[in-house]
Amino acid sequence: MNAINMPVDPITDDRLSAKARGIYAWMLWALKTGKTVNLKAATDAGLGGANAVRSGFAELEEKGYLTRSRVRDERGILGEAVYELYSNPKNT
C-alpha cells in the first residue's frame, strides 16, 4: 500500500471547499511521487474540468496553501509553473 503523510490544516480548514481539499491532496501525492503537477495532469487525474481545477488552484493560493511561479529563460520565454504547497497557510 502506498501512503503519504497528510497535514491536518488544509483538510480541516473550513475556509477551503471540498474541491480545493481534494486538489491539495492530489498535488501533495503528485509532488511527493515525482509526478507532473499542472492543469492538464490535474484534469487528466479526474479532479474536474479545466475551469474547476483553475478555481481550485486559485482558492488554494488565496488561502495561502499554494504558490505558483514561472521563471523566464534567457530569451524571455516563460517556463513551466513551479508549485509549492504549504501545510500551514502562509498569508493568514
Image (cartoon, grey):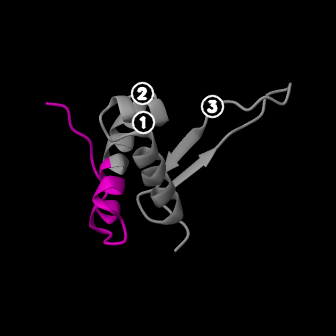
Q: Is residue 38 visible?
A: no
Q: Horizontally, is 46 left or right of 65 in the view? A: left
- Count all numbered tags in the image, as a single digit: 3
Question: Percent x, y for residue 68?
Answer: 59, 47
Q: Residue at x 27, y 47 (%)?
A: 5
| Secondary structure at numbered mark 3 | loop
In the displayed structure, would residue 26 be above or below residue 90?
above
Identify the residue under disc 3.
Answer: 80
Question: Percent x, y for residue 43?
Answer: 38, 34
| Secondary structure at numbered mark 1 | helix
Instruction: Quadrant for residue 35, please give it.
Output: top left
| Secondary structure at numbered mark 2 | loop
Question: Percent x, y for residue 40?
Answer: 45, 30
Identify the residue under disc 2.
Answer: 34
Q: Quadrant of the N terminus?
A: top left
Residue stretch in magenta: 1-22
Q: What is the distance, in whole Å, between disc 3 and disc 2 at their CAs? A: 15 Å
Amino acid type, callout 1 = Leu
Amino acid type, callout 3 = Glu
Instruction: Quadrant for residue 27, please give it.
Output: top left
Q: Residue at x 32, y 32 (%)?
A: 45
Disc 1 vs disc 2: Cβ atoms closer than 8 Å?
yes
Identify the residue under disc 1.
Answer: 31
In the displayed structure, would residue 67 be above or below residue 9?
above
